[in-house]
Amino acid sequence: MSKPRNFKLVHVLDDNNIGREARAVSSDHSAVKLWLRLLSCSTQIEQEIRARLRQRFATTLPRFDYLAQLERHPQGLRMNALSRYLMVTGGNVTGLTDQLVGEGWVERTPDPVDRRSLIVKLTDAGREQFLQMAEEHEAWLLEMFEGFDAQHKGTLYELLGRLRVHLVQKEADALGERPSANPSPKDRR
């Protein structure tokens, strides 16, 4: 028999909407509850964005993220850098690149510094398509967060930033390193 959930959110969300937080029970450690709440919020937003991208643009979130990285780097990116930015394997990036080159949204050019490497860039058509998607993507996020108090948004943003720094520091400590506040040019690549 499972333990009864005993926290305020259960009174607001029914069993169909509570998602991953349904796994938490009142006796769980606060870290478990926090993780499940973060995951639930992220998953809920991500599922909505995925559905809207599929419905409106017949595209996927990975393709959108790929194009967003190239938009942020108009000079283009090496495939391995793009893979790191997207936090996916090189094979995934290669597959997406092949698709987007075929659609005329992305082009590969030889890296002038290292002829063995390729630079991936948005084409004009790719940039135009991405900017249209990005505009609607932003509107969807604004709509989803509409009515959530601005002060709460600011506080949540700051606290999540602190959590992110904390996690990076923990990871560096575990590896016996300390992240540099001013990375060398080599580390910024």
Image: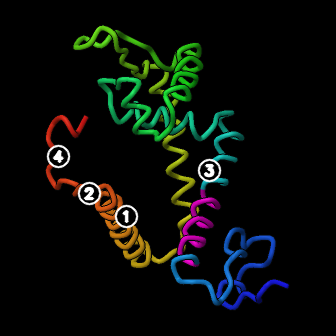
- Mark 1 vs mark 2, foreground winner is 2
Give me the C-alpha separation between circle 4 and circle 2: 17 Å
The residue identified by callout 1 is 167
| Other residues around mark 2 within 10 Å, as few (<14) / some (14–19) / many (≥20) | few
Check residue 176 in the rendering and tell me which mark sits there, or answer none.
Answer: 2
Query: Which residue is pictured at 59% across the width and 66% down the height?
Result: 41
Query: Which residue is pictured at 30% across the width and 13% down the height?
Result: 111
First in sequence, mark 3 or 1: give its number.
Answer: 3
Q: Amino acid at mark 1?
A: Leu
Give me the C-alpha separation between circle 3 and circle 4: 34 Å
Secondary structure under the numbered disc 1 in the rendered image: helix
The residue identified by callout 3 is 49
Query: Which residue is pictured at 34% across the width and 24% down the height?
Result: 76
Check residue 77 in the rendering and tell me which mark sits there, or answer none.
Answer: none
Applied colour scheme: rainbow
Q: Which residues are magenta?
A: 33-45
| Other residues around mark 4 within 10 Å, as few (<14) / some (14–19) / many (≥20) | few
Secondary structure under the numbered disc 2 in the rendered image: loop
Question: In the picture, residue 156 is in which quadrant?
Answer: bottom left
Relative to 7, 157 lies left or right:
left
Secondary structure under the numbered disc 3 in the rendered image: helix
Residue 85 drawn at (x, y percent)? 40, 39
Figure quadrant of the N terminus? bottom right
Report the predominant secondary structure element of the magenta stretch: helix
First in sequence, mark 3 or 4: give its number.
Answer: 3
Pointers 3 and 4 in contact (C-beta within 8 Å):
no
The residue identified by callout 4 is 183
Give me the C-alpha separation between circle 2 and circle 3: 38 Å
In the rendered image, the vertical position of residue 66 relative to residue 161, given as above or below: above
First in sequence, mark 1 or 2: give its number.
Answer: 1
Relative to 50, 122 lies left or right:
left
